[in-house]
Image: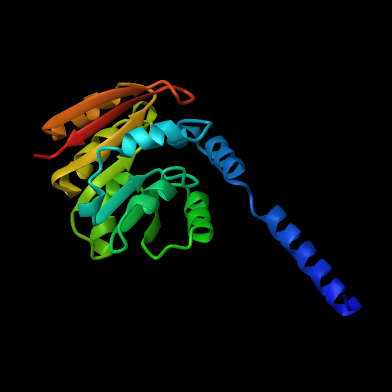
Amino acid sequence: MPPTTARSLKGHRRLDRRRDRRSPSPRWQFLRGFLKNPVMVGSIIPSSRVLIERMLRPVDWDNTRLFVEYGPGVGTFTRPILDRMGPDARLVTIDTNADFTKYLRESIDDPRLVPVTGSASDVETILEERGLGKADYVLSGLPFSTLPPGIGDDIAEATSRVIRPGGAFLVYQFSPKVKEFIDPHFERIERGFEWVNVPPATLFWAYRA
C-alpha cells in the first residue's frame, strides 16, 4: 500500500474515533437527561424490548398515518415505531429536553420523524402549526404521578382532543395513578402489567369511541 494511502486511512480512523468520543452513547445520553430532569424522565433505565413489543402490539400499523410520542428520550420507542410505520406515515416526538430532541434529529435520518422540543400539554398547537390532523395513536412514558400539579390533567385532556375516534392513548407507567388522569377522557381503557422491565411497568391502552 502506498505511504500516502496508509496515512490517509490512519487519518480517517483517528477522525472516526474522535467523532465517536464526541457523540454520547444512547445510554449515556439517557442518563444525562435523567440527572438533568428526573421528574420528567421518570426512569434511570430505558424501556426493555419486551415492554416495547407488548406496548405496541395493539397498533393497527396499516392504517396509521400520524403517531405522536411524548418523552421519546434517546429513541428507545422511536426506532421501533419507525420500523413498523408505513412509508407515508409521520411520527412526531415531543420532549421538554432540547438535548434529547437534538440527539434524535442527529442520530435518526428518517424524513417521517418530526422531533419537537415542547410540552405534551401543547400537543394541539404543535400539530396544528405543522399542518397535521388528528393522531391515530399517542404514546407516553411521562411520569404522570410526579408531574407538577395540573400538568397531568392538561396532558390527558389535550391528548383526548387530538386522537381520532377509534384511536388510542398508549401509556406505560411505574405507578398506576395515571388512570386517574386518563379515565375521565377516554371511553374504554385496557390495562396490563409487564414484569420484564426495570422497574416493572403498568400498561394502559385508552381508546376514543
Residue 123 image offset from top left, x and y in percent: 27, 50
Which residue is located at x 39 percent, y 52 percent?
A: 83
Placement of the C terminus among the 4 image quadrants: top left
Counting labels gives 0
Which residue is located at x 20 percent, y 53 percent?
A: 63
Which residue is located at x 50 percent, y 33 percent?
A: 38
Q: Quadrant of residue 189?
A: top left
Residue 118 image offset from top left, x and y in percent: 38, 51
Residue 82 image offset from top left, x and y in percent: 38, 53
Q: Quadrant of residue 160?
A: top left
Q: Is residue 26 left or right of residue 53?
A: right
Residues 96 and 25: in front is 25
Placement of the N terminus among the 4 image quadrants: bottom right
Q: Is residue 4 left or right of residue 41?
A: right
Which residue is located at x 76 percent, y 68 percent?
A: 12
Rendering colour mode: rainbow
Residue 113 image offset from top left, x and y in percent: 38, 59
Q: Is residue 150 left or right of residue 29?
A: left
**Residue extending furthest toward the left:** 209
Does residue 141 appear anywhere in the picture? no
In the rendered image, the vertical position of residue 8 relative to residue 66, given as above or below = below
Does residue 196 appear anywhere in the picture? yes
In the rendered image, the vertical position of residue 58 relative to residue 202, given as above or below = below
